[in-house]
Amino acid sequence: MNFKRSTFALVSSFSLLILSLAATASAQTNVALVDIGKIFKNHPQFSQQLDQLKTQADQFKASTQQLQQQFMSKAEDLNQFNKNSEEYRQMEAKLAQESAEMEVEQRSKMRNLLTAEARLHFDTYNEIQQYISQYCQERGIQLVIRYDSQPMNQNDPASIMQRVNGGVIFNRPGKDITEKIIERILQVRNAQNPSGTLNK
């Protein structure tokens, strides 16, 4: 009787060990890799809106340079007046006020551009995260690790250090789900915009 109990206990322990090892192996195989940077670059709406923000930033830079030139021209005109005259003091005060107002306005515009860019990254990242989450739930993937899929360039120190400091040393083929996520995003976007135009 004791022998049967011992045998049963041994078999049970062995079965639990096998199940534990199987669960561990399953958890290890249910890991995927994703290159978030590559998805951002291939996200059609993100790319379009980022280009629009860059255009606005270039226009802002050109406008700022033009205003600075106009201000410098006014400052040069000020030299035509006697520094001890009332007219000089009034013109100087006016220029100082205009300069302060221009600086406040330029800072506000720059802050709005930076906020818009940050918001674009925030919204796009959340959208990508939802696509990844849905894809992983469908395929039983339990963990996704972010990495850079770009090969190391021996002539680029930044590329070398990025790879050296990266978290992924080796991965089996088929673990990278980046292209699958990009395909899914493009499919949904094309379905939403069959004409091929992107919503602003």
Image: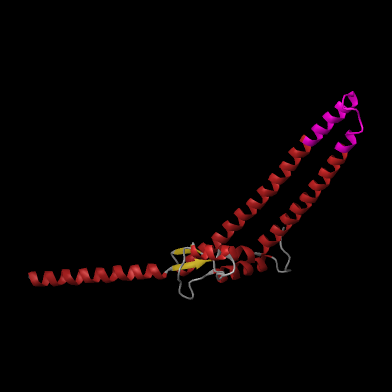
Q: Quadrant of residue 197?
A: bottom right
- Horizontal side, residue 164 vs residue 112: left or right: left
Name the one closer to the observer, 150 or 5: 150
Looking at this rendering, what residue extends furthest in the right direction?
Answer: 80
- Horizontal side, residue 123 vs residue 135: left or right: right
Give the residues in magenta: 75-99
Looking at this rendering, what residue extends furthest in the bottom direction?
Answer: 173
Residue 183 falls inside the magenta stretch: no
- Residue in the image at 61% along x and 66% along y: 185
Q: Is residue 87 above or below residue 73?
A: above
Q: Report the magenta stretch's main SS.
A: helix
- Residue in the image at 42% along x and 68% along y: 30
Q: Quadrant of residue 38?
A: bottom right
Name the one closer to the observer, 167 or 52: 167
- Residue in the image at 72% along x and 42% along y: 107
Counting every numbered tag in the picture gives 0
- Horizontal side, residue 192 vs residue 23: left or right: right
Q: Position of residue 49 (x, y in %)?
A: 70, 58
Q: Position of residue 26 (x, y in %)?
A: 37, 70
Q: Is residue 61 above or below residue 82?
A: below
Residue 91 falls inside the magenta stretch: yes
Task: Pick the quarter of the image with the C terminus.
Answer: bottom right
- Residue in the image at 12% along x and 70% along y: 6
Task: Pick the quarter of the image with the N terminus.
Answer: bottom left
Q: Is residue 62 above or below residue 199?
A: above
- Horizontal side, residue 123 vs residue 2: left or right: right
